[in-house]
Amino acid sequence: MRNYRVLYSRAVYSLRYPKIAFLLLILFVARFGLSLTPESSPPAAPQEQAQISILSNQLLQDATVVDCRKDHCSILVTNFAFAEGYTSPLGIRLADELSAELAQQTKSITVVDRALIRGPQEDLIENRVPGPIRYSVPVLRSLGAQTHASVVVVGQLERSSDRIKLIAHLCNVKNAKSAGRSFELALPTPQPAELSPSDLLPPLDPLPQTANSPRIFRNADRSIIPPKCTSMPNPSYTDQARKFKISGTIRMDTIIAADGTVKPLRVAEGLPFEMNESAMRTIATWKCNPGTANGEPIPLYVPIEVTFRLY
């Protein structure tokens, strides 16, 4: 403390002598660690929260466009995903923040607890529904229906060299044609860990081939003539899949036996609403001419795809 007083008194005394005052000021700064640089910019969190607040307000103002009216509406904020079809810690965090902000800004519209979508999302992964379909508007609308929401917030993340853009809009759960305007916010690129995929499908195990079972051949062998199916009825849409206009392709691994019957083994990529089960039941009824090796019929692993489209 005594050194401080000495320096301070000398600085005041030397105000008549600018050069000496300047040198003493430098010494004072060096001794006590004061900064002469401008204050650093505010942390990102308040800026992010301010933008989330603006986005929340914009969505609420647009609510009537999707028939979301006070005291008769509930909103579910779905996870925000990249166009490639995966969410991330960032997408989940932003959705949580927006959901909390919506609840704070309105009391006349119910904001659905986002924890309620955890089970349905796990079901989608268990059914091996690929990301681009999981985060499609029809499937997100179905999540809204399962959580008794009237409207869902659908958001997509876009990445540039120094920014992350979130584009969000409202979508009516019961009416696919009722969608609100798109609103955007831009945020600085976060740490890489916040951008890592959170919900990729787990890898499949290799197809079984045990020493004690008859050999099951693979199409990679050039000596094999592949099977040709002669009766291939189309699988039926389930009611829920038709209701939400689910489209996509189911890819499954099968065995076409030496007698031409088809045995579905597993789904590699699937669809929700029991579409996988519908496809597997139907494919099990297919009739084929079996594959052959050296003129003899053989059991063969065969991948099969079934595409569903509603027009």
Image (spheres, helix red, strand yellow):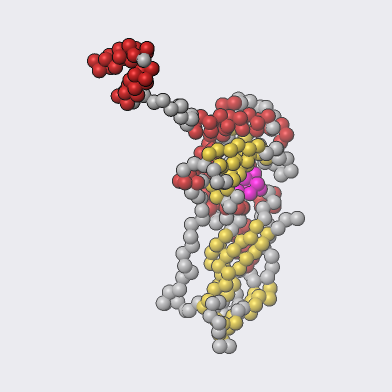
Left or right placement of residue 98 versus residue 32 in this view: right
Determine whether, in the image, residue 69 is placed left or right of residue 100.
right
Closest to the observer, 76 or 119: 76
Q: How many marks?
A: 0
Q: Give coordinates of residue 266: x percent, y percent.
A: 54, 64
Whether residue 308 is visible to the viewer of this picture, yes or no, is yes
In this rendering, the answer to whether 236 lies above or below 123 is below
State the residue lying farthest toward the right. Answer: 311
Residue located at (66% from left, 75% from top): 229
Residues 83 and 19: in front is 19
Q: Is residue 282 left or right of residue 23?
A: right
The percent coordinates of residue 128 (x first, y second) are 55, 56
**Residue 32 position in % (x across, y down):** 31, 23
Q: Residue at x 57, y 60 (%)?
A: 269
* Main secondary structure of the magenta stretch: helix
Vertical relation: 220 (above or below) 160: below
From the top left corner, tell me how far across and down residue 146 is, in percent: 60, 43
What residue appears at the point 58 percent right and 88 percent down from the top-left corner?
295
Q: Which residues are magenta?
A: 134-143
Q: Residue at x 55, y 50 (%)?
A: 86
Q: Quadrant of the C terminus?
A: bottom right
